[in-house]
Amino acid sequence: MEKKLDLKGIGLRIRSEREKIGLTREQFAEQVGISPLYVGQIERGQRAMSLKTFVKIADSLHANTDFLIYGIEERASGTDKDGVLNLLEKCSVRELKLAEEMLKLLLTYIK
């Protein structure tokens, strides 16, 4: 028996991740290279996407593909520096500067 993908669930997780990083639908569409209308259809679970588009979406969101498809979050191991470094490697120069400032701010509050 073939498992059916939960397009609505995938779309909701994509939308949630997009909103977490503060991108409008238009900004996200431009980043991924698709139309805002198509992004909306994906987020509402009305249209499936190609594997190529899905990979672009996951990369743009810096999201785990298992999470986007199944809703399964990776368990954080004690100090997973590799995970943080992998995320940083995908960042643009602007995103790296912002991440550095946010980390500095966060560290001042948790120390």
Image (cartoon, grey):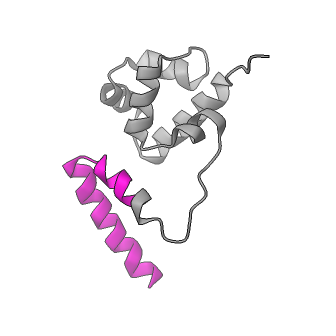
Question: From the viewer's perspective, is residue 98 above or below residue 25?
Answer: below
Q: Residue furthest front?
A: 1
Q: Residue furthest left?
A: 93
Q: Is residue 101 magenta?
A: yes
Q: Residue furthest bottom?
A: 111
Q: Is residue 47 magenta?
A: no
Q: Residue furthest right?
A: 1
Question: From the viewer's perspective, is residue 49 above or below residue 87?
Answer: above
Measured from the top left, where is residue 35 in percent x and y? Answer: 38, 17
Image point (38%, 80%), residue name: 108
Question: From the viewer's perspective, is residue 103 above or below residue 50?
Answer: below
Measured from the top left, where is residue 11 in percent x and y? Answer: 58, 28
The image quadrant of residue 105 is: bottom left
Which corner quadrant holds the N terminus?
top right
Magenta residues: mostly which secondary structure?
Answer: helix
Question: From the viewer's perspective, is residue 105 above or below residue 65?
Answer: below
Image point (65%, 44%), residue name: 72
Q: Is residue 20 left or right of residue 98?
A: right
Q: Is residue 100 left or right of residue 74?
A: left
Which corner quadrant holds the C terminus?
bottom left
Measured from the top left, where is residue 4 in percent x and y? Answer: 71, 19
Measured from the top left, where is residue 32 in percent x and y? Answer: 35, 27
Q: How many numbered discs? A: 0
Image point (38%, 37%), residue name: 60
Chain part drawn in magenta: 84-111
Q: Is residue 50 left or right of residue 34?
A: right
Image point (46%, 26%), residue name: 54
Q: Nearer the viewer, residue 45 or 50?
A: 50
